[in-house]
Image: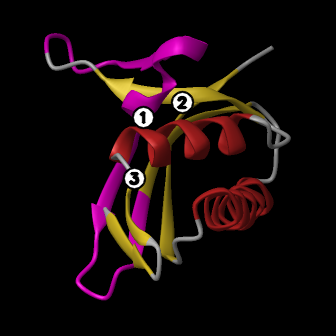
Amino acid sequence: MKLQTEKGVITISSDVFTNITGAAATNCYGVKGMAIRSTTDGLVHLLRRESMAKGVKVKLNEDDTISLELHIIVENGVNLMAVSRSIMSEVKYNVSRATGVEVRNVDVFIDSMVVG
């Protein structure tokens, strides 16, 4: 994404958005980690900290905003609506604060639940 300022152009890679998003989401209560669905066996796998960006998809919109899609794994027994709202709020705030780019929407997909 390119941002035009009075002093020049700032280019922000989509990796920046995925890293900020992954970090903000995994810091929320009840989130075990980011998830990815394997193409070989179709199962959902928990991503390690260094590859959690794979659980995030970034879409650049025409109006210079972004839309984010997160795939997560939550702990058993948490309120799914409360966790999802918390993630949406935290991600939107952290990405906007760190990059200056407006986040249009954050879609949270709960792919699995972990016991323990």
Boundaries of the magenta span: 40-68
Asked whether the residues under the numbered discs 2 and 3 touch, taking CB atoms below 8 Å apart as contact, a structural biologist would say no
Q: In 3D space, how far apart are the residues under numbered discs 2 and 3 (Cα atoms)?
A: 22 Å
The residue shown at (39%, 52%) is 12
Task: Name which residue type carries label 2.
Answer: Met
Lower sequence index among marks 2 and 1: 2
SS at mark 3 in the image: loop
Question: Residue 113 location, x and y as percent?
Answer: 62, 30
Dots 1 and 3: beta carbons under 8 Å?
no
Disc 3: which residue: 12
Instruction: Mark 2: give few (<14), some (14-19) or many (20+) Cα within 10 Å.
Output: many
- The span from disc 1 to disc 3 (Cα, nearest Å) is 19 Å
Question: How far is disc 2 from disc 1 in space, using C-alphas?
Answer: 5 Å
- For the N terminus, give its image quadrant: bottom left
Which residue is outermost to the left?
Answer: 40
| Foreground: disc 1 or disc 3 | 3
Circles 2, 1 touching at the beta carbon (< 8 Å): yes
Look at label 3 and name its amino acid.
Ile
Q: Earlier in the sequence, mark 1 or mark 3?
A: 3
Residue at horizontal 25 percent and vertical 18 percent from the top: 38
What residue would you read off at disc 2?
Answer: 34
The C terminus, quarter of image? top right
The residue located at (37%, 29%) in the rendering is 54
Among numbered discs 2 and 3, the one appearing first in the sequence: 3
To which residue does mark 1 refer? 55
Which residue is at a point 80% across and 37% down the rendered structure image? 30
